Each structure stands twice: as structure tokens, then as C-alpha cells.
Amino acid sequence: MSGIADVARLAGVSKSTASRALTGGGYVSDDTRRRVTDAAASLGYVPSTSAVSLATGRTRTVALIVPKVNRWYFGAIIEGVERSLISQGYDVTLYVAEPGSRDRESLYSTYLARKRFDGIIAVALEPGDSDLERLLAIDKPTVCIGNPLQGIPTLGLDNIGITRIITQHLIALGHTDIAFVGSTPPTDAPARDVDERSIGYRNAMNDSGLAVRIRNVPSTLTITDAYAAAASFLADAASRPTGVVAACDEVAVGVIIAARRMGISVPTELSVVGIDGHDYAEMFALTTIEQYPGAQGVEATRLLLSMLEGEQPPPRTTADTRLVVRASTAPPRTL
């Protein structure tokens, strides 16, 4: 296996010059750096991360914190962050810990306290979360994906705006009896993104003179819980809504499955809209607001790397979304 001495010999420079050229630990002319990197590439030599860290004070590693990995949204973000960091020559250390768990406590008291990274990307923190103070105390460049957070640049959706759009889509089709499914259950901790989506629904209903028709149905953001909730409120034909605004696509899918099993035609008897652009959305012909969590991971990485170069990104960056109309929505059936 080749070492730094072999690289220096091939490039015609001293070992110290070769080390500086490869680690960035001092001045080296562009021509010399090019000769050294070409020599290293031809020999298959890669400087150790510890050597680079000693020379530059950088670990070339980013900490990525997510609450879980077994959800489509978080998995796509992880993929986007990892792909983007690797292309820039960075490693990523993934920390998975649900809020309030013992793992989460260990994360802050032990692993993050070691500061073996140059910066942090954190996903889905709540504004009142004590983790926010802990992140600030670590004193490393940090970017968050999700809710707006005081003191940390964040990338996220305009939840109120996008839910207003999909609710107005149903209203424009002629629906007046529309329910919002996926409100946070009373026993669960508040979730700001869900609360904001509920606000967007209510605003659209109010603006259209449908305030008396506002109906919130609690459910966790899972297909199974949404199925159970839908089976309950769809059972009574006399009070059944003609339209459903789901807090996310998984909730929408749960509602559609429940409706089909109960013999309720979608969209002839029930129109359903969602939010996310989940992998399941096209399979269920779901009208939805698409977001792109993989692209959010890439953009969050770009923001963080710009901070490492001394730039200061805006406090809030709004992620791209797009309304995609499919066959789960139609005008209400007239009797």
C-alpha cells in the first residue's frame, strides 16, 4: 500500500509539501497541488481523516439527526443528505433518536458533546423542544429541516399555504362538506406542522363561507390509524363528508382504503386530497401537494456547507412544492 513518501517521490516534492497539498494544512502553489493530487490518485493514496483534521481543524464530517428512519419522508432526506455530502468529500454520521427517548438523551449528553463533526443537520424539531437550546449550546454550524426555529436557519414547507391550496381545490370542484383528517390526537404532543395544516384548511373554509362545516378528525399520521378514524366517520351516510383533506398522504391512503372497503366510491362519493408526494400517491391516484424531501436534504446540505465557508443563510427557506391533480378528486355527486 502506498504512503505519503511514495506520493512525494512521484510528484517530486518533499513529504511535508505533499502532506500540505493533500490536507490543505498550508500554502502550496496550484501547480504543485495538482502534481501531488495526480500522484496520489495514480497510487490510490487517500489521506486519513485524522491527518486532515489535524492539519485543517476540520473533520470533514456532518452529524445528521432524525427522529426515525422507517418513514418515507426521513429516509428520502437521509438519502439526499448523504448523496450531497459524499459528492463534496464529506462523511455523514447518522443519529436516530425519537424525542423524549433515552437514546435522545444519550445523543446530547455523550455523542454530540464530543463534537466530532463540523456541523449539524437536524430534522423535525419542534420550536418548544429543549433540544433547540442543546443544539445552540454545541456551538457548531447547524441547519434544520422542518418547523421554523429561533436562532437556527431552517428549511421547510409553507404548511398553511399548501393546505389552503388543496382545500380550495375541493371547494372549486363544488364540495362544501369537507373534513380535515389527521389532527393531532389530544393524548399526543403538539405537532406544529400538523397544526399549521389544520389552520390552512380552516382558513380556506372560512374564506369560502363554510365555517359551519369545519370538521377536524384526530388521527396519527399513519395509514392504520387513519383507516380506523375513517371507518368511524364514514359509517353514517347522513353525516358523511363529500371531501377529505388529509394531513399527509399516508392519512389519505388510509381514508381511501377504508372508503373502498365500505363500498364508498372514490372520487364519485368521496374526494380525497393529501400532502407529500409519497411513493404511494401515484399508486392510489391521489391528488396531492408534492414535496421533495430528497431535494430538501440536498438543499440543507448546501446551506450548511455555505455556513462552514463563513456565509450566513436566511433564517427561513421555503421548500419547493407542486399540486398534482389525479383521479382521487372530482365534483360531488348530485342526487
Image (cartoon, rainbow, N blue to C red):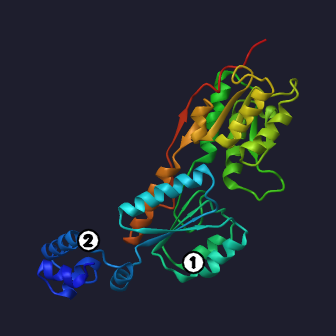
Q: Earlier in the sequence, mark 2 or mark 1?
A: 2
Looking at this rendering, what residue extends furthest in the top direction?
335
Which element carries disc 2, helix, strand or loop?
loop
Q: Residue at x 68, y 75 (%)?
A: 105
Residue 75: give x, y in percent of width and height.
56, 54
State which mark lies toward you, 2 or 1. 2
Residue 60: give x, y in percent of width and height.
40, 73
Q: CA distance from mark 2 to mark 1?
A: 33 Å
Q: Can residue 231 be seen from the camera position used here?
A: yes
Quarter-of-image position of residue 37: bottom left
Q: Residue at x 80, y 32 (%)?
A: 213
Residue at mark 1: 112
Quarter-of-image position of residue 17: bottom left
Q: Quadrant of the C terminus?
A: top right
Image disc number at residue 44: 2
For the residue marked with disc 2, what is the amino acid?
A: Gly
Direction from residue 330 to residue 145 in the image, left or right: left
Q: Quadrant of the N terminus?
A: bottom left
Residue 77 versus residue 55 in the image, above or below: above
Q: Residue at x 88, y 23 (%)?
A: 238
For the residue marked with disc 1, what is the amino acid?
A: Leu
Residue 159: give x, y in percent of width and height.
62, 47
Front residue (pair 132, 272): 272
Direction from residue 6 to residue 71 in the image, left or right: right
Badge 2 vs badge 1, beta-carbon distance below 8 Å: no
Q: Can residue 312 be seen from the camera position used here?
A: no
> Circle 1: is it few (<14), some (14-19), or many (20+) Cα within 10 Å?
some
> Circle 2: is it few (<14), some (14-19), or many (20+) Cα within 10 Å?
few
